[in-house]
Image (cartoon, coloured by chain):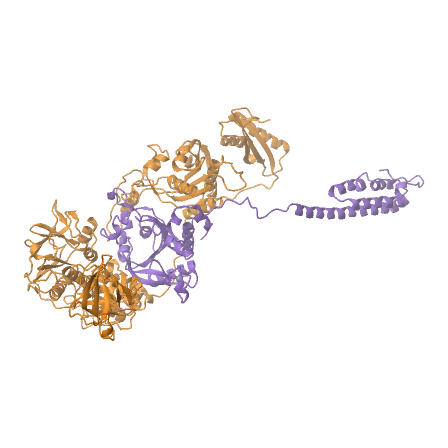
């Protein structure tokens, strides 16, 4: 909402010294938030005066351009002193003008030398077309008043005298406060509402522009029938006849529309817009001669269409509320009128519609037709239902005053506005809710200031003159309870807490004290929260960089991962209105998101990356899912209803994904060592498990999107068998190509929720021996296909309880072992709990370990 | 060694002559002094203090002396050997010290050539900022509540007093899941977590709900379809707006410094009444002239729009099974991304969302 300050001042008796910025701040404090403060006309300085054209000589010049050489009387103060000194002896100033829409005797606007026009254009006496042009005759565009640059401004005869200040006459300078109006402050979508709060802010008198006297309704104007009074509780028509369609819009009115952000169009349209801005009541004007039969307000019928004022043909929905006449729809109620009955340059009889429309009906229609208009914006937030008769009267008065003709005597009023019921509120509720030390008299005064009628139980029933309402008919309020009837323009105020907000904003939000509440003793982070943090910190410590990513994917992404058709990761939640039609699904695996982030980093010159993503995936059991219930809101859901809600929401576990590409970036690994990415990925998830107190088991597996020969399942101890929580390994070469990743990029993904659930709540303390350790190495040769994990298990089993730890430290294939075989070298550490081991004991244990590996896996000792 | 000889006359034993002992001693001391390396000294020790060294051999002969001569010879030889041993120890210490000095010189490295840096791991600042805020509230006894990102429409809207015709429920703002009759959506705020907290936790409730939320905004420099919020909810007996202000002031000071506080402006949110927008006093200029006029953080306003807040609307309490006659509450919500942006001077939302490693690495593991 843009409100010119001069317009606000028409209704709010603000002190002269209130600066616009100060006013804007005060309004912001009352809930009308300042968006922008502008000062139109501030870029225009110096003398700008009214002139009368004394003489006009048209001259054709060699360049083909025709100009007018004029003598202009710019008033005694600005005319040259010696008449004789003029070039041709004429009076006034000589000015060259390129426009032709004027004649001798016309009043024009002249910028004199020394003036600066918008855009920094400085006026000076200058030689042009063989004359000295001693000023400039201005167009609207040159003064920043509109688009018209071809024609100069010609004032109405008698509007002013030569020498008058034209800037004031044209209302060029003003201050405009642009505000963001919240949904609960629909009243502020009018100058009436803004000025009311401005007056409230400065505690000065407010004169209500809706306060004009209006006759009682009859059926004497244009006939109206309303078939759906819930959607249209009130419909008022007035008729103006004998109107002069050529009458111009007065300058002040056009300027105000302009400053408020609307384009002047024609007098009749401008007046309806002006009154809408002034009062907040949207008005529609019909050309009476184009109406056929009575106006009927009804819902649309199947197949009906309407061409709206914007020239669009609209197929109507049977929920749309329409204004119709005998020939069909002539307007979409509360949203936009139709073209067929539009006011035209030939209209002399105007039917004025001022009505109240249901906010929800209007909002739905506007949304359905993607047609947000000044009218729908106001109706869907709530317009003062008492306004239609007043607004219709105001429009009629202005049309007659500015365009001639007369207002026909009747006023059709269909429907009525039911009186509002009072809201009972504890007198101390504002203090209890806001914490502001506000007493009951202050509360009552604040509520009356915003227009409420307040019955505080005192003898003289509380009533305020400015609403003209009373609380008659309702029993008097008991002690400590206020009965508060909100004003007609505050349809948003329905609850006691709404009244609390009104009191708070009048008293001032800045009076809310600052008191830190004391929460009961808390339990700290949950186990899951603590462990997820540990995973993130641990991976960062291990050299991985965390990224965030959007969860949107498409079938093409799942195809690129090589997921089979029956893979559960193909069962994805689908977005009805995705940003991209190519990504309508919510990811079931983090792979597409993380691999795309990696590809972006590779593209930006970082092929050597270790990244991780810790985020939720969405794993519905089936899609479409069973519908979630929509429960009532006037009570809490039952346990069963709550369970139904939870059951409808798909499973959304946290997953962890890590990706390893290129060189690790340390000198610890030789440059060019590209074979170890898969091992890094496996190591990363083993490390994550370890951080959570879990020993992960790694086994060969085949799964998408991994290389079938380089994929490991990651399992953790479960209640019975081990539970596979994810996979790690080298990506399938096709996946690397599809996502544009370096060769041999490795990837791992695990279900963090499962890891967290399995993590021990309490970790047992270790029992360890202080006896000396005995070390023994063993190198075994096995078939290439035998997993090192199996060899290790066999060694462990064979070595028995004296074995303390075992570590693989070398894997060799080559000339020194037979082809098809590999050598695995292990470092074994032995220790007894109670004694120093003898050489014989160690040798025996080592021997037993080797024997077990030999027996189970055909391992032989390497020579 | 010979046994004691008691039955024959004293004889001359040459090695035990005083002159001979002194000579051997002096030879040893000279050799020790001449040893310039630990290896050389080892040889000297063998030659002059080993089992077969002249003094050791001389010592063996003492037994062959008559008893009356043994004492004197023993003293003489013992003293000589002792002198040699101490000289050896002294020289050993000297040579070891010199060797270590030399080693320290020899082992000099170029400490600026640190090829072995550990790889630069880091955590995303949106994560660490959420944790930091969480820690602050946990320190006050609050708990951190979580909820699903795909949420039931009822919890995201209806329960929060956003009725079926509320404009925010339009497809223009909300990602609905398909089909719409499933009444599921991507949560548009973390407020459904508050509703869940009220529905499932015993009162009083003091919870913080940080998390990811979704709106149908095309990504550009200032918009992202996915962003992060932190919302707080306190429902207790006697809660007022003053407690809201106190909590936000504390939050602001903990995050931005002791001189920072907040101010309220009336606003509108369906789930709170009264509602306020909360501005943060600019932590750079503190809204004080003349610094405020040229401040780039707050663009000369002195205040930074921080978030929304208010007193929990009794209608929300009712839908969540809380008696509004007995309990009142407050709620607030801030954008984490926004907070990170103005706290760290980040210009483009996409820097945070695209996963460029340079962005994350700059923060290390903290904000
Ligand atoms: Zn600042």
Q: Position of residue A207 (x, y in %)?
A: 19, 70
What residue is shown at x 69% (from left), y 48% (from top)? B101
Q: Quadrant of the C terminus of chain A?
A: top right
- Give the x, y percent position of residue A366: 20, 51
Q: Position of residue B341 (x, y in %)?
A: 39, 54
Q: State which chain is coloured purple.
A: B
Using the image as rendered, state which of residue B262 and residue A526 is in the foreground. B262
Is residue B330 visible to the viewer in this orientation of the structure? no
Q: Is residue A40 above or below residue B37?
A: below
Left or right of A854, for residue B278: left
Q: Between B329 and A54, which is closer to the camera in this rendering?
A: A54
- Residue A718, position as x, y percentages in the image: 42, 37
Q: Colour of chain A?
A: orange
As drawn, is A200 to the left or to the right of A546? left
The vertical placement of B122 against A831, above or below, is: below
**Quarter that holds the N terminus of chain A:** bottom left
- Hey, which quadrant is residue B61 in on the image? top right
Image quadrant assignment for residue B40: top right
Q: Nearer the viewer, residue A197 or B195?
A: A197
């Amino acid at each position: 909402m843009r409100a010119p300050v001069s317009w606000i001042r028409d209704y709010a008796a603000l002190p002269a010294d209130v600066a616009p910025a100060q006013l804007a701040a005060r309004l912001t404090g009352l809930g009308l938030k300042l968006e922008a403060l502008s000062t139109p006309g501030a870029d225009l300085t110096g003398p700008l005066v009214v002139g009368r054209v004394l003489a006009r000589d048209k001259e054709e010049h060699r360049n083909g351009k025709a100009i007018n050489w004029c003598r202009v009387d710019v008033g005694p103060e600005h005319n040259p002193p010696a008449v004789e000194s003029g070039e041709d002896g004429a009076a006034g100033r000589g000015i060259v003008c390129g426009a032709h829409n004027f004649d001798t005797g016309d009043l024009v606007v002249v910028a004199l030398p020394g003036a600066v026009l918008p855009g920094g254009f400085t006026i000076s006496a200058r030689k042009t077309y063989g004359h000295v042009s001693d000023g400039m005759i201005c167009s609207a565009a040159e003064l920043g008043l509109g688009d018209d640059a071809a024609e100069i401004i010609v004032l109405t005869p008698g509007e002013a005298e030569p020498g008058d200040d034209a800037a004031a006459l044209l209302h060029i300078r003003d201050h405009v406060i642009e505000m963001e109006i919240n949904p609960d402050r629909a009243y502020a979508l009018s100058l009436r509402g803004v000025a009311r709060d401005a007056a409230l802010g400065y505690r000065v008198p407010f004169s209500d522009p809706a306060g004009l006297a209006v006759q009682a309704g009859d059926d004497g104007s244009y006939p109206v029938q309303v078939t759906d009074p819930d959607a249209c509780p009130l419909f008022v028509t007035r008729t103006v006849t004998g109107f002069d369609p050529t009458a111009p819009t007065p300058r002040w009115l056009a300027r105000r529309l302009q400053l408020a952000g609307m384009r002047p169009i024609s007098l009749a349209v401008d007046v309806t817009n002006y009154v809408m801005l002034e009062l907040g009541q949207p008005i529609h004007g019909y050309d009476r001669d184009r109406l056929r039969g009575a106006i009927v307000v009804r819902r649309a019928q199947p197949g009906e269409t309407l061409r709206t004022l914007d020239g669009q043909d609209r197929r109507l929905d049977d929920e749309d509320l329409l204004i119709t006449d005998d020939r069909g729809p002539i307007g979409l109620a509360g949203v936009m009128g139709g073209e067929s009955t539009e006011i035209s340059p030939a209209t002399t009889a105007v039917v004025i519609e001022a009505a109240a429309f249901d906010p929800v009906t209007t909002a739905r229609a506007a949304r359905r037709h993607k047609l947000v208009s000044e009218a729908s914006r106001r109706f869907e937030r709530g317009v003062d239902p008492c306004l239609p008769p007043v607004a219709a009267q105001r429009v009629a008065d202005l049309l007659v005053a500015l365009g001639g003709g007369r207002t026909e005597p009747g006023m059709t009023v269909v429907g009525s506005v039911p009186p509002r019921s009072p809201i009972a509120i504890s007198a101390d509720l504002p203090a209890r809710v806001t914490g502001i030390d506000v007493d009951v008299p202050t509360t009552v005064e604040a509520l009356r200031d915003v227009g409420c009628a307040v019955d505080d139980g005192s003898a003289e029933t509380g009533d305020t003159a400015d609403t003209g309402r009373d609380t008659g008919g309702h029993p008097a309020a008991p002690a400590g309870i206020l009965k508060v009837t909100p004003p007609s323009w505050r349809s948003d105020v329905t609850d006691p807490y709404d009244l609390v907000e009104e009191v708070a904003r009048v008293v001032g939000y800045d009076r809310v004290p600052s008191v830190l509440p004391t929460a009961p003793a808390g339990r700290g982070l949950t186990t899951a929260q603590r462990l997820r943090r540990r995973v993130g910190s641990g991976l960062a410590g291990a050299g991985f960089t965390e990224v965030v990513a959007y969860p949107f994917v498409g079938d093409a992404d799942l195809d690129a991962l090589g997921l089979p058709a029956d893979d559960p990761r193909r069962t994805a939640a689908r977005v009805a209105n995705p940003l991209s039609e190519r990504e309508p699904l919510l990811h079931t695996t983090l792979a597409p998101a993380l691999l795309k982030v990696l590809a972006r980093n590779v593209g930006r010159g970082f092929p050597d990356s270790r990244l991780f993503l810790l985020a939720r995936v969405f794993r519905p059991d089936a899609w479409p899912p069973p519908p979630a219930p929509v429960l009532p809101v006037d009570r809490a859901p039952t346990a069963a209803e709550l369970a139904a809600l939870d059951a409808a929401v798909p499973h959304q576990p946290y997953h962890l994904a890590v990706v390893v590409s290129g060189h690790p970036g340390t000198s610890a690994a030789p440059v060019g060592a590209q074979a170890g990415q898969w091992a890094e990925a496996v190591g990363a998830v083993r490390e994550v498990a370890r951080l959570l107190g879990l020993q992960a088991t790694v086994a060969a597996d085949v799964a998408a999107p991994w290389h079938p020969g380089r994929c490991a399942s990651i399992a953790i101890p479960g209640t019975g068998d081990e539970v596979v929580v994810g996979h790690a390994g080298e990506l399938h070469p096709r996946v690397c190509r599809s996502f544009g990743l370096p060769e041999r990029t490795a990837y791992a993904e695990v279900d963090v929720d499962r890891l967290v659930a399995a993590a021990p709540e309490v970790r047992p303390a270790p029992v360890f021996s202080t006896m000396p350790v005995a070390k023994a190495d063993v190198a075994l040769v096995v078939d290439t296909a035998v997993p090192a994990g199996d060899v290790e298990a066999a060694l462990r089993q064979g070595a028995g309880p004296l074995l303390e730890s075992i570590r693989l430290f070398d894997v060799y294939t080559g000339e020194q072992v037979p082809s098809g075989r590999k050598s695995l070298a292990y470092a074994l550490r032995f220790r007894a709990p109670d004694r120093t081991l003898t050489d014989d004991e160690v040798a025996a244990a080592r021997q037993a370990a080797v024997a077990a590996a030999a027996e189970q896996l055909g391992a032989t000792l390497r020579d | 060694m010979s046994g004691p000889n008691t039955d024959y006359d004293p004889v001359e034993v040459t090695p035990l002559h005083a002159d001979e002992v002194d000579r051997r001693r002096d030879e040893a001391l000279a050799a020790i002094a001449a040893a310039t390396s630990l290896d050389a000294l080892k040889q000297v020790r063998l030659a002059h203090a080993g089992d077969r060294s002249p003094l050791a051999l001389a010592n063996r002969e003492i037994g062959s002396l008559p008893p009356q001569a043994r004492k004197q010879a023993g003293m003489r030889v013992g003293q000589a050997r002792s002198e040699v041993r101490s000289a050896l120890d002294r020289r050993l210490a000297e040579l070891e010290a010199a060797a270590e000095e030399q080693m320290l010189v020899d082992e000099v490295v170029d400490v600026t050539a640190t090829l072995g840096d550990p790889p630069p791991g880091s955590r995303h600042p949106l994560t660490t900022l959420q944790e930091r805020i969480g820690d602050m509230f946990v320190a006050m006894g609050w708990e951190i509540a979580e909820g699903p990102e795909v949420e039931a429409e009822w919890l995201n809207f209806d329960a929060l007093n956003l009725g079926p015709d509320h404009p925010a429920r339009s497809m223009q703002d909300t990602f609905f899941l398909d089909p719409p009759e499933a009444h599921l959506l991507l949560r548009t705020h973390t407020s459904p977590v508050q509703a869940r907290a009220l529905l499932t936790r015993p009162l009083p409730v003091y919870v913080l709900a940080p998390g990811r939320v979704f709106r149908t905004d095309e990504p550009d420099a200032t918009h992202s379809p996915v962003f992060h919020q932190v919302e707080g909810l306190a429902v207790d007996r006697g809660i007022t707006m003053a407690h809201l202000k106190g909590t936000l002031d504390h939050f602001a000071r903990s995050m931005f410094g002791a001189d920072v506080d907040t101010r309220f402006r009336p606003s509108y949110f369906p789930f709170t009444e009264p509602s306020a927008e909360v501005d943060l006093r600019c932590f750079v200029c503190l809204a004080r002239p003349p610094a405020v006029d040229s401040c780039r953080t707050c663009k000369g306003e002195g205040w930074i729009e921080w978030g929304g807040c208010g007193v929990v609307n009794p209608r929300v309490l009712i839908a969540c099974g809380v008696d509004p006659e007995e309990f009142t509450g407050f709620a607030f919500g801030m954008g984490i991304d926004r907070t990170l942006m103005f706290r760290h001077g980040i210009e483009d939302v996409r820097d945070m969302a695209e996963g460029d490693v340079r962005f994350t690495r700059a923060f290390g593991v903290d904000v």
